[in-house]
Image: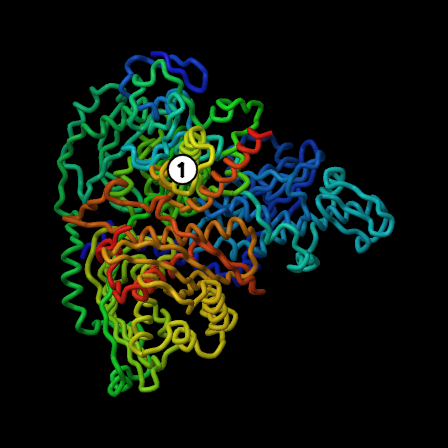
Amino acid sequence: MSAAFSADDYINQIMRAAEAQTATSPKTEFNRRGFLKVVGLAGGGLVLAFHVGGQNLAFAQDGIKRTADEKKEFAPNAFLRVSPDGSILIYSKGPEIGQGIKTAFPLIIAEELDADWKQVKVEQAPINPAVYGRQSAGGSRSIPTSWDQLRLAGASARAMLIAAAAQEWRVPVEQIRAENSVVIHTGSGRQLTYGALANKAALQPIPDEKSLRLKDRKEYKLLGSRISGVDNRAIVTGQPLFGIDQTLPGLRYAVFEKCPAVGGKVKSANLAEIKKLPGIVDAFVLEGTGKVAEVMPGVAIIATSTWAAFQAKRALKIVWDESEASKDNWHEWIKQAEALAKQTGPETIFSAGDFTKATADAKVVEAFYRYPFVSHTPLEPQNCTAWFRDGRIELWAPTQNPEAGLAAVASTLGLPQEKITIHQTRVGGGFGRRLINDFMCEAAAIAQKVNAPIKLTWTREDDQLHDFYRVGGFHSFKGGIDKSGKLIAWADHFITFTADGQQPTSGGDLRPDEFPAQVLPHVSLTQTKLPLKTPTGPWRAPRSCSIAFAVQSFIHECAVAAGRDHLEFLLSIMGEPRWLKEGDPYALNTARAISVIKLAAEKAGWGKPLPKGRGLGLAFHFSHAGHFAQVAEVSVDTNKKLRVHKVTVAGDIGPIINLSGAENQVEGCVIDGYSTALGLELDIVNGRIQQTNFDTYPILRIPHTPEVAVHFIQSDFPPTGVGEPALPPVAPAIANAIYNATGYRVRTLPLVREGFTV
Amino acid sequence: MQLTINGQQHTVPDSEGSTPLLWVLRDHLGLVGAKYGCGVAQCGACTVHVNGSPVRSCVTPASAVVGQQVTTIEGLAASVGKTDGRLHALQEAWIEHDVAQCGYCQAGQIMSAAALLKNNPKPTDADIDNALAGNLCRCGTYIRIRKAIHAAAARLNERAAS
């Protein structure tokens, strides 16, 4: 099996790097990365920057030329800046992809700074991981990996402002408190604003990290409240925030046509004809690097406008060499998987106890589940603006992963990373798609051949055809129920895919600790890997987004077979309240699980009488350090017309940073999860994705939107992310509700494949 | 070819007559509030007003709007007399209700909602669903979109009453 254009190595590397930064390690990260250093600011004020090895790395890549004197006294790339006029500028270091981080990160700093939020302005930080640490957005890791770092940045500045006031008033720091950008001498009531203290604060020594007292939750004024997003005004007035909105003097517009079956190469193309079309500047073949995460072979067209480029792209006639291209076929895979379902898999993922012996005199339930490939389909198609000149390249990119983008562009062009500058733009939807920077590499490769800045814009069709898809999969389950009605044994033959013949493809791995394997005595998890060429990648809550549907539906099947109430059955599986790996936020904590399950059930009115054709369905899933339970309320008529009335969500991700943002994420997760479960499926025929626009790929629309009730248990565990973990329970909660409403068991997604309509 | 965009006259080469209004706005006039999402009038991200009615600018040739009043999100507030940085009631409500996630579709959502409120000052949920069914939000902010439209309608009705 050729792995020539597999992206798995690359993606797995990204995911491992992301996951190595666990929620327990950011303090180490903070210490290792560097130390806070105060930098005097031309015009006065307090600036805090992270420095490494005594060199101000904030200068390294911002592309601004400075004199030696300016370098000493001017540092624009700090985390925060307090100006003498009282305004506070906070740089948000991570990509904003719709998860609200551009508001959440500055809120954390502002809280510890005791800043007046009304005086805070937020800007996107330059991409410079040496200064800022982690700058990617993925795995719901932004909050847990940055929590301590950002709190310390805010607390350090606050301590220096207080120290400055102590000096001014000649009083001990213990007698001074701060609130709302003002320091107050407790005894005399004297006050000074942060602005008035900014210059003096800049002269204070950097406080020792250990001397800083971080706030207790009870003292929070900003965190936990509802704060409107910092870019909202620019969004609702149509300002140029996104990658696709970027422009430069003399900009040329580019498109890039690749083989619809991944791996195809350009044999010939009607380039001469294309070059004669109106508005066309150039057209040429790019051989590419042969890596799907960089540049695959194709034809680039350069034009004087996007529309001229789109029109010319339609007129392209390319003969593809498809000898090594994908011939993948979804329907063939379904047949193969159905044939394999009766057996156990040739590879063991996890085994505990003795499944065969345990089920010898138990009631055995069997079922076969399947879910399809789906695309990310962010509403802003992939695009990137790039300008190659004087042996350097600058890119303006809507990426989730600028850190990896630097390396990918360097590899594509054979340039050292110092010669690459990435400007992070706002991102019109991530969902995991833009962790991979193929669009950035393509723009870079095209720009290298054009004597002008270029903006590469993918059409919607390009975006659908060249994704790193959420992998489909199949589960052949057996559950064993003993005479007392207890679930004692669990077997899952997982039928998945491999691109390299070795590892499961990205997003297609079943983990040995996948629930409920780690809480049952007799378990057999096995797998079969079918070969594929279609690129796959992380899709919002990778693995969990699909596996939870199968697992949580089958648990309900077992509850039904045992004749027990689903809520009581699920709680009994959790067993005693315990943390399966003490101190590891990525390990299930059954106490937290039980709490959210009970809360969701209580809030949704579990057990309430319902009319015929109406039902409640329950599901729980733990992923991305978040414990989430959901209850869906649906009605189904005799023609299988479905209405999801309401989804009640209970989640525990620790303390909430921005309540409005967190609730928005949960609402979005529910709607995304329902949208995907209801109607989204990619058909792959001869290596080609068949659903190329919204007419055949029906994202949920407003008339079908359910009510969503969000309840957080704000436990005392450190805060974790919420962009992903609220999604996985949606599909099984709805499927289980359909069963309770109708007695019909959904085992295939999407629901339209089972004959449901809305 | 003369186009009237947000009350201002713009001269666009006649050769762009068949170019969709969306790309004339974005590439020629630098008005990037209307977004490209699908190119086939399926997602609504490109919604603008022509003589007050919502149209999908990605499938509307520029020549078709000669002599018509085109309003984009950039000119929405001014079109209802809100100048000097003041906003349309819908824009205010969008900020207060923190509607956006990625924000890419929201200009189109607001333009569809503005056209709705002009003809229907007290829309029901069903009216909203009907008027905004052509606007996709991939992030799933529909719940807040409904709330914001109701809030803006209530505010406009209060102002009209006082």
Image height of A447 relative to A557, above or below = above
Let me know if residue A253 appears in the view.
yes
Q: Which type of secondary structure does the marked residue at label 1 adopt?
A: loop
Q: Residues within 10 Å of mark 1 (few under 14, many from 20)?
A: many
Quarter of the view holding residue A402: top left
| Residue B67 coordinates in the image, percent (x, y) | 36, 13
Residue closest to the eye, A456 or A565: A565
> Is residue A588 left or right of A731 when viewed as pictured?
right
Colour convention: rainbow
> Is residue A625 left or right of A729 when viewed as pictured?
right
> Is residue A712 left or right of A285 when viewed as pictured?
right
Let me know if residue A419 appears in the view.
no
Residue closest to the eye, A684 or A237: A237
Quarter of the view holding residue A472: bottom left
Residue closest to the eye, A624 or A752: A752
| Residue A217 coordinates in the image, percent (x, y) | 64, 59
Q: Residue at x 51, y 61 (%)?
A: A653
> Is residue A235 left or right of A541 when viewed as pictured?
right
Which chain is indicated by disc 1? B
Q: Which residue is mark 1?
A: B105
Q: Quadrant of the N terminus of chain B?
A: top left
| Residue A393 coordinates in the image, percent (x, y) | 41, 34
| Residue A210 coordinates in the image, percent (x, y) | 67, 60
Residue type pointed to by label 1: Cys
Q: Count every numbered label the image shows and give the total.
A: 1
